[in-house]
Amino acid sequence: MGQREVRIPDVGQASEVEVIEICVKPGDQVSAEEVLIVLESDKASMEVPTPVAGRVNAIAIHLGDQVDEGDLILTLESDETLPESSADPDAQGQPQADAQRVPRSGPDATPLPAQVPALETDVVVSQLAGARGAERGAAKPDRAEPGAGAGREPVPDGQLGSSARAGRAPRTKVYAGPAVRRMARELGVDLGQLQASGAHGRLTKEDVQAYSRRVMQAAPARESTDPEIPEQDFSRFGPIELIPEGRIRQIGAKGLHRSWVQAPHVTQHEEADVTDLENFRQVQNAHRSADGVKLTLLPFIVRACAHVLREQPRINGSLAAGGKQYVCKQYVHIGIAVDTDEGLIVPVVRDADTKGIRQLAEEIANLAERARSRNLKPQEIQGGSFTVSSLGVLGGLGFTPIIHVPQVAILGVARMAWKQQYDGREFLPRRMLPLSLSYDHRAVNGAEAGRFTTRLAAVLADLRELIL
Ligand code: CAO
């Protein structure tokens, strides 16, 4: 029994080939021809088997390594000598698992081509040890079998076969070509989990797609109902008190989690110069009659949003089921995030684009008051096509609100502040209002979001835009 070094064989024209699977671990007993590692070049996956039986000692490579011919794979404790090549098991009448086969070396073998041709096909997994053994002319004469030379023609492109043949040491490996492996890696699918539907137990692209479809279909249901908050014992770190989480907060948490998971969020930031708007608002409030409605910033923001949503209806839409159509809504119903003792509630102002600022102010105040006293009707929290979340009075420079899916965008408003603005001649103090538009990037692209926030800032800067 001696120590044998198994090295990377000739991998054709490829160099710097990636190690994508290591099929053994130290201490494993392997039989001759059992696959040790799988390599992948741009064009092909290649299984590298051990030319001799033995016990794996130390593995010299790692997943993801880029390797070349001659690099050490591992060392084996073996009583056989390297290099070695076995006779073709097919010649012994064993059935062949793959339609294609690797010509093997034998005592009278014509050596295989010096280089294994690069594969163009996406269904072939090649084994290389035989090729290397033959190349060295190191086959053992006493292993020769009649007919072993049957497959000794030069290997045509795309004709390398797997040696996955029945009767060989049982393999726990999966059989899949490079394209299937690539697809699985991109989708994060573990090939070991799949049932193969291809010939001779080979995995197909359809197997990967079907598996990933099943996982995707199962996932949203679980995520929407169970955000899987892990059990933790915080009392290990200090005293705690467990208080019941209200129903509204629980429902809100699941909704936020669902929206966060479903929609790829991007947030676009902008500042609006609301100096003139604020002056106008304060004058209006100063002259209002005793029973008149107080105007806050919010109804102006809602009215400006409704105006720009009419101009840019994409932001007011929704993705249709399956994603092959877009729902363009002929209405502009704007949800207003209201902070209540019970949690966040989002009543909806219907047809906000048709209402004046005073009417909106009155309606928002009324909805907010009824949200806090839990007096909203179910239909008053349904049907929103866009949402405004104003944290301005509470402070903050900006934030990234979570979209109320299936809506595709939400505007976060942070606190207005005095800032120096340059008008081309001098710096002037202006009241600037931070706006943050989170949008579902599946439905809205960055340019659309940028156009929306820029236009919104322009309307807020000059309310005369609303009457044009
Ligand atoms: N910057 C500075 N001041 C602001 C402001 C801003 N962005 N937004 C409003 N204000 C001002 C108002 O104009 C008003 O000023 P005056 O007293 O001078 O008139 C004052 O702050 C109080 O406004 P308000 O908060 O009472 O009323 P509102 O219409 O602006 O907001 C409501 C109503 C219901 C949206 C708000 O009370 C609320 O609940 N906000 C919290 C929303 C929330 O929690 N969002 C986070 C959700 S997570 O995405």
Image: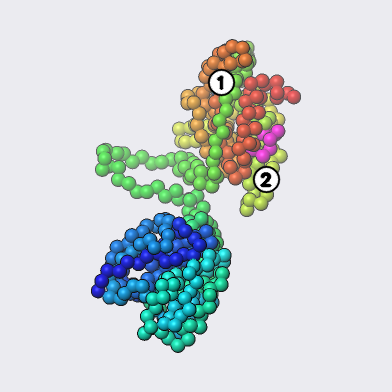
Looking at the rendering, which quadrant does residue 51 occupy? bottom left
Give the quarter of the figure containing the C terminus.
top right
Residue 121, given in percent of the width and then of the height, sits at 57, 66
- Farthest residue to the right: give it: 468
- Farthest residue to the bottom: give it: 146
In this view, the residue in front, 398 or 94, is 94
Residue 377, given in percent of the width and then of the height, sits at 58, 38
Q: Is residue 313 left or right of residue 222?
A: right
- Categorize mark 2 by other alpha carbons within 10 Å: few (<14), some (14-19), many (20+): some
Check whether the beta carbons of the residues at disc 1 and disc 2 lie within 8 A of each other. no
Q: Is residue 235 above or below residue 14?
A: above
Check disc 2 and report the residue beneath it.
327
Q: Residue at x 70, y 24 (%)?
A: 466
Q: Residue at x 42, y 60 (%)?
A: 68
Q: Is residue 293 above or below residue 444?
A: above
Check disc 1 and report the residue beneath it.
432
Q: Secondary structure at mark 2?
A: strand
Main SS, magenta region, reads helix
Can residue 168 be spotted in the picture?
Answer: yes
Can residue 194 be spotted in the picture?
Answer: no
Q: Secondary structure at mark 1?
A: strand
Q: Is residue 461 left or right of residue 2?
A: right
Q: Write the start and end of the magenta stretch as one range.
A: 309-315
Badge nearest the viewer, 1 or 2: 1
Q: Is 311 a magenta residue?
A: yes
- Categorize mark 1 by other alpha carbons within 10 Å: few (<14), some (14-19), many (20+): many
The mark nearer the N terminus, 1 or 2, is 2
Looking at the rendering, which quadrant does residue 168 occupy? bottom left
Q: Is residue 8 above or below residue 335?
A: below
Q: Is 261 a magenta residue?
A: no
Kind of residue indicated by mark 2: Val
